Image (cartoon, helix red, strand yellow):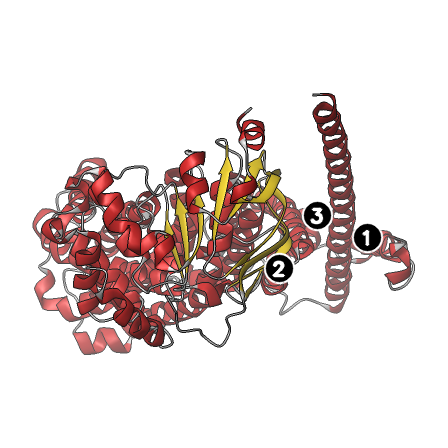
C-alpha cells in the first residue's frame, strides 16, 4: 500500500545509535543500535525488566535518551521530540483513556487535540468494532473492549509509526482479526512491537531485537532467529 | 470496514500540519476536566464540606458566634485557603492514574495547555466554592450581612482566586509525581499563598466591619490598594508560571 | 583536565579577601563603631544580623537565577550551583533568625516579636525554603529532580522580593520597629555596616564556591567508581558467556 510521504521522511524510519537511558542512577537500557526502514516491523523480545517498554517509550518521544543519539521519523533525539508529536501511535499496558468518559468522548478529545473533525471518531469506532459500546464509560468495559478503543486512540492521526507493547494480550481471535489490517503488517506502517510470544512475534517481524538486562543480546532478521537465541533471553 | 481508512488517513496527515494552539487545546482540556468533575464529583463536594466544617471548627476554637472586621476576614480567608489545599492535592490525580500525561505528550499539543486548563479549572472551582461558602459563612459566623458589601467582597475574592489558581497549578504540577505529595504540596503552597492571604484578609476586613464604608470609599482607600497588590502578585506569578509550565510536564 | 587554567586569577584570592574583610569588619564593630545610646552593647549585633539578612535574601535570588540558567542550558552543573546557593542561604537564614531573636530578647524582653515586617517576611521565606530539600528528595528521577528544583528556585526567588513588599504593606505594621533602617546612621556606623556587609557577602561567596567544588569532585568520583564497577561487571558477564 503506497503511503503519501512527507518531506522529512527518509528511507529509515527509526535509527538508534548507542542509545541508553537511566532511571535514578540505574541504567535501564544501554548501547542499543539499530536501523529500521519505513514499512518494516521490528519485534523486541526479552524477559520482564529487560528494557522493552523503556525502548518503546524512548522511540515514542515520551522520554529522552540519557546516552546516544536517535532519529525517529526525521526528528533527532534528544532535542526534537516536539516534532514527533502526533506522528507516533502507542498501544501499551495503559490504555491512556479517561475511565469516566465514554469511548466516543475519549476519541473525540483525541481528535480535537489532533485538530481532526468529529467524523473521524465514527470512522475509528467502526474500524475497531467499538461502535456498539461507544457510549459506555471506559470503566464499564471489558479489557478486550478497552484494548480496541486504545488502538483507535493510537490511530487517531493515522501515525506512520506504531509502537505496540504486547498488543494482542487482551484480544480474542475475532478482535485480533478485526484489528489486523489496522495495526498488522498489512497496514504498511513502520512498527515496533514487543511480545511475550516469540513465535507469534517472529511471524510478524522483519527484524528482531533481543534485549537482556537493558542490552542488545542480538539483532537479526526474523528468519535467522532460532531457539538458541531465544533461550538466551529468558534464562 | 478498513476501506474507509486510507482516504481519511491522507486527509488526517495533511490536517496535522495545523497543530492546535495552546489556547484551543487548553479550552478542550478544560471542558474535559469540568465534564469529568461533573460526572465524578471528586473535588467540589469535598471542598465545600471541608470549608463549612472549618467554619464550625473556628466557631468552637474561637468560642465566638459572630465575627466582624479583621477576625471575620481572617477566618474566611483561612477556611478558603484550606479548601484550596484540598483541591491542589487532587488536581492532577486523574492524569497521573489514567495516563493523561502520556496521552497528552503524544498529541501535537504544547504541554503548557494542560497546566493552563488545570489552572482555569481551579479558578472555577474556587469561585463555585465561594458561591456556596460565602452564604454559609454569612449564616454561621458573620456579624453583618455581606449583601451590602458584595461588590467589594466579590472583587477581592476574584483576585484572590486567581492567585490561588496560578500558584496552585504550579505547585500541583511540581508535586504530582513526588513521593508523599499530600504532605509536600501544602508545605510548598502555604508560604507562597501568604501574600494572597494577607491581601484578601486586609481587603475584606473593612468590608466585614459592622459599619462598613461605601464601595466607593473602600475602593479609594484600603480596597483599591489591596486589589492592586493582589492583581500585581497574580500577574507576576502568572507570567512566571507560564514561562515555567513547559519544564514541568515533559520527562 | 587541569581546570585551574580556566580559572580567573589565583584560587586563594577569594578566601584571603574574605578573611581580611571579616577581620576588618568585626574589628571596626568592636573598636571603632560608637556605642548606641538606647540599646548599648547589644546593638552591635546589628552589624551581624542585618548583613546576614541581606546576603541571605540576595543568595536566594541568586539561587533562582542559577536555576534559570539550568533550565535554559540543561547543564546539571548549574543545578548544583543553584542547590548550593540555596543551601548556604538556608544556613545563613537560620543565623539571621537566631541573631534576630537574641536582639529581640535583649531589646524587648521576648524571643520573638511580631513588629518588624522584614523579619516577619523573612520567617515566611525561610518556611518556604525549608521545603526545598524535601521536594528534591521526594523526586526520584535525577533529571526531573534537578528540573523541578530549578522551577522551585525560580518561583521562590521571585517570591522573596514580592513577599517582603506585601508584608510591609500589611496593616499591622503601621508603626514598625525600625530594626534595619540605615537612613539616619552616623558616618562611623555607616562605614562599619558597609564593611560588615561586604565581609558577609564575601563569606557567602567563599562558602558557595567551596561547597560547589567539593560536591563536584565527589560527584565525579562517584561516577568514575560507578563506571569502573560496571566495567568489571561487564567483564565478569562476558567471561560467564564464554565459559557457558
Rendered position, C233 above or below C110: above
Q: Give the mark nearer the N terminus: 3 vs 1.
A: 1
Dots 3, 1 in contact, CB < 8 A: no
Select label 3 or label 1 by which is in front: 1
Q: Which residue is mark 3?
A: C41
Rendered position, B50 above or below A72: above
Q: Which residue is mark 2?
A: C74
Dots 2, 1 in contact, CB < 8 A: no
Say the numbered circle drawn on residue C22.
1
Q: Position of residue C50 (x, y in %)?
A: 64, 56
- The residue lying toward the viewer, choosing from C43 and B249, is B249
Q: Position of residue A41 (x, y in %)?
A: 46, 52
Quadrant in the picture for the C terminus of chain C = top right
Determine the image quadrant of residue B108.
bottom left
Q: Secondary structure at mark 1?
A: helix
Give the mark count. Answer: 3
As drawn, is A161 to the left or to the right of C243? left
What crowding class fits label 3: few (fewer than 14 Cα within 10 Å), some (14-19), or many (20 or more)?
few
Amino acid at each position: 500500500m503506497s503511503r503519501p510521504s512527507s518531506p522529512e521522511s527518509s528511507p529509515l524510519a527509526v535509527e538508534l545509535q548507542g542509545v541508553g537511558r537511566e532511571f535514578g542512577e540505574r541504567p535501564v537500557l544501554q548501547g542499543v543500535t539499530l536501523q529500521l526502514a519505513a514499512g518494516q516491523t521490528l519485534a523486541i523480545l526479552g524477559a520482564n525488566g529487560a528494557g522493552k517498554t523503556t525502548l518503546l517509550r524512548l522511540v515514542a518521544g515520551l522520554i529522552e535518551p540519557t546516552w546516544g543519539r536517535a532519529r525517529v521519523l526525521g526528528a533527532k533525539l534528544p532535542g526534537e521530540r516536539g516534532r514527533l508529536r502526533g506522528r507516533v501511535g502507542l498501544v501499551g499496558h495503559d490504555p491512556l483513556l479517561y475511565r469516566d468518559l465514554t469511548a466516543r468522548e475519549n476519541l473525540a478529545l483525541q481528535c480535537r487535540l489532533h485538530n481532526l473533525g468529529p467524523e473521524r471518531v465514527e470512522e475509528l469506532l467502526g474500524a475497531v468494532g467499538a461502535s456498539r459500546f461507544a457510549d459506555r464509560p471506559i470503566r464499564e468495559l471489558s479489557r478486550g473492549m478497552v484494548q480496541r478503543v486504545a488502538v483507535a486512540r493510537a490511530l487517531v492521526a493515522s501515525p506512520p509509526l506504531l509502537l505496540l507493547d504486547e498488543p494482542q494480550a487482551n484480544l480474542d481471535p475475532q478482535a485480533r482479526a478485526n484489528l489486523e489490517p489496522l495495526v498488522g503488517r498489512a497496514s504498511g506502517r513502520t512498527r515496533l512491537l514487543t511480545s511475550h510470544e516469540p513465535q507469534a512475534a517472529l511471524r510478524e517481524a522483519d527484524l528482531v531485537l533481543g534485549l537482556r538486562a537493558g542490552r542488545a543480546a542480538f539483532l537479526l532478521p526474523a528468519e535467522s532467529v532460532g531457539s538458541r537465541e531465544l533461550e538466551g533471553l529468558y534464562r | 470496514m478498513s476501506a474507509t481508512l486510507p482516504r481519511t488517513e491522507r486527509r488526517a496527515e495533511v490536517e496535522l500540519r495545523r497543530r492546535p494552539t495552546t489556547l484551543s487545546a487548553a479550552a478542550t482540556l478544560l471542558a474535559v476536566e469540568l465534564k469529568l468533575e461533573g460526572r465524578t464529583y471528586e473535588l467540589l463536594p469535598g471542598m465545600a464540606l471541608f470549608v463549612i466544617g472549618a467554619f464550625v471548627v473556628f466557631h468552637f476554637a474561637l468560642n465566638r458566634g459572630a465575627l466582624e472586621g479583621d477576625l471575620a476576614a481572617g477566618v474566611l480567608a483561612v477556611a478558603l485557603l484550606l479548601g484550596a489545599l484540598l483541591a491542589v492535592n487532587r488536581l492532577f490525580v486523574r492524569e497521573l492514574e489514567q495516563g493523561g500525561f502520556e496521552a497528552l505528550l503524544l498529541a501535537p499539543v504544547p504541554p503548557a495547555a494542560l497546566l493552563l486548563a488545570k489552572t482555569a479549572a481551579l479558578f472555577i472551582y474556587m469561585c463555585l466554592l465561594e458561591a456556596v461558602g460565602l452564604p454559609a459563612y454569612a449564616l454561621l459566623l458573620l456579624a453583618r450581612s455581606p449583601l451590602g458589601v458584595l461588590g467589594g467582597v466579590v472583587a477581592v475574592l476574584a483576585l484572590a482566586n486567581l492567585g490561588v489558581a496560578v500558584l496552585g497549578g504550579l505547585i500541583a504540577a511540581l508535586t504530582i509525581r513526588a513521593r508523599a505529595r499530600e504532605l509536600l504540596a501544602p508545605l510548598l503552597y502555604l508560604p507562597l499563598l501568604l501574600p494572597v492571604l494577607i491581601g484578601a484578609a486586609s481587603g475584606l476586613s473593612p468590608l466585614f466591619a459592622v459599619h462598613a464604608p461605601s464601595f466607593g470609599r473602600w475602593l479609594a482607600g484600603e480596597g483599591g490598594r489591596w486589589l492592586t497588590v493582589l492583581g500585581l502578585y497574580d500577574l507576576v506569578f502568572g507570567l512566571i508560571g507560564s514561562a515555567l509550565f513547559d519544564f514541568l510536564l515533559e520527562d | 583536565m587541569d581546570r585551574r587554567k580556566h580559572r580567573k586569577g589565583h584560587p586563594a584570592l577569594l578566601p584571603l579577601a574574605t578573611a581580611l574583610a571579616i577581620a576588618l569588619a568585626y574589628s571596626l564593630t568592636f573598636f571603632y563603631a560608637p556605642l548606641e545610646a538606647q540599646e548599648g552593647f547589644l546593638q552591635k549585633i546589628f552589624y551581624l544580623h542585618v548583613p546576614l539578612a541581606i546576603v541571605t535574601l540576595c543568595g536566594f535570588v541568586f539561587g533562582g537565577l542559577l536555576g534559570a540558567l539550568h533550565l535554559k542550558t540543561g547543564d546539571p552543573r548549574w543545578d548544583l550551583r543553584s542547590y548550593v546557593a540555596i543551601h548556604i542561604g538556608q544556613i545563613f537564614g537560620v543565623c539571621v533568625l537566631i541573631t534576630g531573636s537574641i536582639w529581640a530578647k535583649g531589646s524587648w524582653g521576648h524571643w520573638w516579636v511580631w513588629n518588624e515586617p522584614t523579619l516577619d517576611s523573612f520567617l515566611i521565606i525561610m518556611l518556604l525554603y525549608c521545603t526545598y530539600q524535601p521536594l528534591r528528595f521526594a523526586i526520584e528521577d535525577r533529571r526531573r529532580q534537578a528540573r523541578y528544583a530549578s522551577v522551585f528556585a525560580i518561583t521562590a526567588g521571585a517570591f522573596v522580593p514580592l513577599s517582603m513588599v506585601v508584608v510591609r504593606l500589611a496593616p499591622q505594621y503601621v508603626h514598625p520597629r525600625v530594626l534595619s533602617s540605615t537612613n539616619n546612621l552616623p558616618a562611623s556606623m555607616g562605614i562599619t555596616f558597609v564593611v560588615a556587609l561586604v565581609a558577609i557577602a564575601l563569606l557567602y561567596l567563599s562558602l558557595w564556591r567551596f561547597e560547589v567544588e567539593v560536591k563536584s569532585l565527589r560527584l565525579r568520583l562517584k561516577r568514575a567508581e560507578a563506571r569502573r564497577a560496571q566495567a568489571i561487571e561487564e567483564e565478569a558477564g562476558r567471561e560467564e558467556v564464554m565459559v557457558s
